[in-house]
Amino acid sequence: MMLAAVKTRQKGEIVVKSVEQPQLSADEVLIRVDYCGVCGSDLHAYNHAPGYEFVQGPRILGHELSGVVVEGGGGAGSLLHKRVTVESIQYCGECPTCRSGRTHICERLQVIGLHFDGGMARYVKCRSRFVREVPATLSNLAASLAEPMSIAVHAVEAIGKVRAGERILVQGAGIIGFFTGIVCRSLGAEVIVAGLPKDRETRLVHAATFGMVPHVEGESDGIRDKADVVFECSGSPQGVQASLETLKKGGRAVFVALYEASVELFLTRAVRNEWQLLTSYGCRPADYTRAFGILQQYEPQLRQMVSIYPLAQAGQAFADALQQKVLKPVLDARN
Ligand SMILES: [Zn+2]
Ligand SMILES: [Zn+2]
């Protein structure tokens, strides 16, 4: 038996309890979890948001995990005792989108911790081909941030194609917003991160650490000129409107968030400005390698953004995240 944080069928309920340890198939390894981040999509699933109907309870959530491989069958021997993280999007490798190299939008994709049990537990199993060894110089805590950092890498590099010297507006001062800004900074772009008035003394104080300019929505400071690229990371219809207000003619808007409600958009305005409206979903295997490098570079600063909760207090972590009391809750599964 093992301790796990289980999302029940009840909306907004996480129960920490003792459950059966996962049983391995031949191509799977067993990972003893160190850390598992609470992600926006975990909150959507917990909230029974539209688009998350497929996450039925009881389910152990968690796809942002780090740990050590303690058992593995078949060809997984080389991973045994290694410090690892996992690729959240588990793809078939055979469908047309997979064959075109876009495994992150596989026709049959499944996400660990949403479609099947994930890492908010003492142990998790994973198919060995989705297990990634963590570089020796990266801590296990930082490794648990590899998945959200890979999402940002994909949005900025593969979709946004950000270049040095470009002016970037990141809408939304949540963790994906900051990670997106960090990747843009690492490429030599100028970054403004926009948040709500309530974020001024809390979330937005992190902007300076990464050389970003904070901006409080509705105020005139920070935004002097329009942006070449906006990254919409707020997930709110108001955020979409605000981000487009600051976009140059001919600019690129990249939608990275997932939305709990429909968003209205007057397309004529977008057409007349010839805005490129782009969406970014998930990440590809190669994005993890790049994410490891960025995490190493910024590890001390990133540590300031994380709030650690023991696994037993998972319910509290979800409640605090929903009320935006913390920027990035991470569960410590070791105790
Ligand atoms: Zn995530
Ligand atoms: Zn596929």
Image: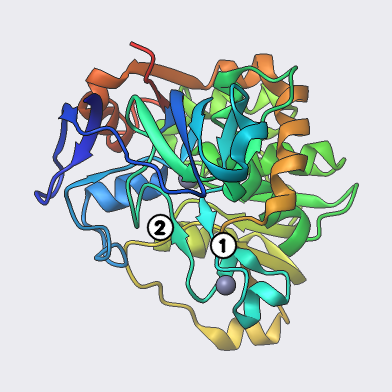
In front here: 70 or 199? 70
What percent of the width, then of the height, locates residue 76? 60, 39
| Residue labelled with disc 2 | 236
| Residue labelled with disc 1 | 281
Please name the amino acid that badge 2 sits on.
Answer: Ser
Q: Is residue 57 above or below residue 139?
A: below
Query: Which secondary structure lies at badge 2?
Result: loop
Task: Report if residue 193 is visible in the image.
Answer: no
What percent of the width, then of the height, locates residue 106? 56, 71
Q: Quadrant of residue 209?
A: top right
Question: Which quarter of the image is occupied by the C terminus?
Answer: top left
Please name the amino acid that badge 1 sits on.
Answer: Tyr
How many neighbours does mark 1 have within 10 angstroms: few (below 14), some (14-19), or many (20 or more)?
A: some
Residue extending farthest to the right is 164
How many neighbours does mark 2 have within 10 angstroms: few (below 14), some (14-19), or many (20 or more)?
A: some
Q: Residue at x 82, y 37 (%)?
A: 186
